[in-house]
Amino acid sequence: MIAKYLKIAEEIKSQLTNGTLVAGSKLPSVRQLSEEFRCSKNTVIKAYSELEKEHLVYAIPQSGYYVVNEFKISAHDPAVIDFLSAGPDKNLIPYTEFQHCLNQAIEKYKEDIFTYSDHQGFHSLRTEIVKNLENSQVFTNPNRVVIVSGSQQAIHLLTALPFPNGKKNILIEQPTYFGMIESLQIHQATTFGIELSMDGIDLERLEYIFKNNDIKFFYIIPKFHNPLGHSYTNKEKKKIVELANKYDVYIVEDDFLSDLDRDKKSDPLFSFDTSGRVIYIKSFSKVFLPGLRIAGVVLPAIMIKNFLRYKFSVDFNSSVLSQGALDIYLKSGMYNSHLKTIKEVYFNKMQLLKRSCEELLPKGTDYTKPDSGFYLSLYLPENVSAKKLALLLSEKLILIDDTNRMFLSEYKKDNLVRLCISQVHDHQIKLGVEKIAQTIALLGK
């Protein structure tokens, strides 16, 4: 039997959902509801207290209770098997812990977070990020770190920014993160591609491109690549940095999933750089809170002034409240505790996905084999279209990415699909792969 206070709370939610109550509406008094539901005033107060915990209503002393915002039921259908969404697992997001950090930030930094702030970012946060980066073998100082509104802002600014080498063209892996391709297209940058597989890139081809194509920077995802899941070896990373130094090319290292790496001996390209040529981007979106929109960029000293000028023209400074809360979260040690949990969860999901692919995929279908991370990709048989597969599967409530947006036009392929494990439930993985396999076999006839 449902407790009376929960019935009251559900009735109010129902009115929020159907629009009877809207943002700012005053709710019935405690006495009115106690009479309507024939219960004690304490029961009504308990119902309102539950709604306050869900941030749906708030109380004004001597006045009553009011609606914070319209209530919307999640549109996410539990029948959907979501291999498409790439945000962190919603069950792993530390909402409550971070809420405490937000509250503390308002108390501790109130004189700083509600006024104009340092364009480069909250100094205390930059210091904490530097300490955090040491775990990834990135050793720098706060003066070289700039706080940006997510890694996408860093990518967008760097694409437009003049570089000290005076060059204009950009090199990217193929395929690669679609946000990078969007920025390149918006800025109409001359772009070259280099093909990437789970065997890596052709280093001789890389040297040829560096030597002959006036490359400003090479954008690279060194660990758990999007969409392939590929990770470079230390030997390969060292060679890439050597070639960049030889041909005066900068490297933009997007290390957005490095926190999931279980290999403690796997170093970033930044660690092999002795000439300030590697720009390192550290994001907190994929493994922590996407809506936080905070990332750190480690820049060569020579580039910081110009980078800040470009950033100022976009948004003056990134959210200082978010910066203050993240600073407290990192200081508290909660972030490292969070990482221990998610490392295990995503590793286990990836192993389950790989086992399912091994057991179920039809002949002629190959798949990448990342150690961990978010992404695994399928190479389809020649006569199977990725677009058609994605469309047919969506009709069966299975969502995948056909990767079309991850290729430059001259590299486009219709035989690659990406599976993301971050938001799919463990019990859905094998079933999802089974249905993908059946649909591939159907299309291949």
Image (tube, rainbow, N blue to C red):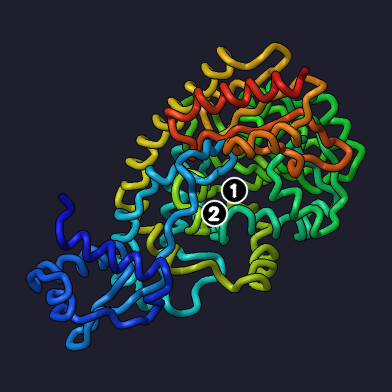
Q: In this view, does 397 lie to the left or right of 184?
A: left
Q: Where is residue 249 in the image (x, y as percent from the top left)?
A: 78, 43
Q: Which of marks 1 and 2 is nearer the N terminus?
A: 1
Pointer 1 and pointer 2: residues touching (CB < 8 Å)? yes
Q: Which amino acid does label 2 sit on?
A: Gly
Q: Where is residue 319 in the image (x, y as percent from the top left)?
A: 49, 68
Nearest the camera: 48 or 53? Answer: 48
Question: On the picture, is 105 further left or further right than 82?
Answer: left
Task: Kindly tell me whether residue 112 is visible in this rendering.
Answer: no
Residue 43 appears in which quarter of the rendering? bottom left
Q: Is residue 380 above or below residue 191?
A: above
* Residue for point 66% across, 30% down: 228
Residue at image position (40%, 57%) is 326
In this rendering, does residue 174 appear at all?
yes
Compared to residue 86, the image places residue 363 above or below, namely above
Residue at 71%, 46% (x, y): give it. Answer: 178
The residue tagged 2 is 296
- Position of 47 relative to 152 (above/below): below
Q: Distance between the residues labelled 1 and 2?
A: 6 Å
In the depicted view, which residue is nearer to us: 147 or 368? Answer: 368
- The reply, left or right, for residue 334 in relation to residue 408 is left
Q: Name the residue under label 1.
A: 281
Q: Where is residue 298 in the image (x, y as percent from the top left)?
A: 58, 51
Q: Quadrant of residue 434?
A: top right
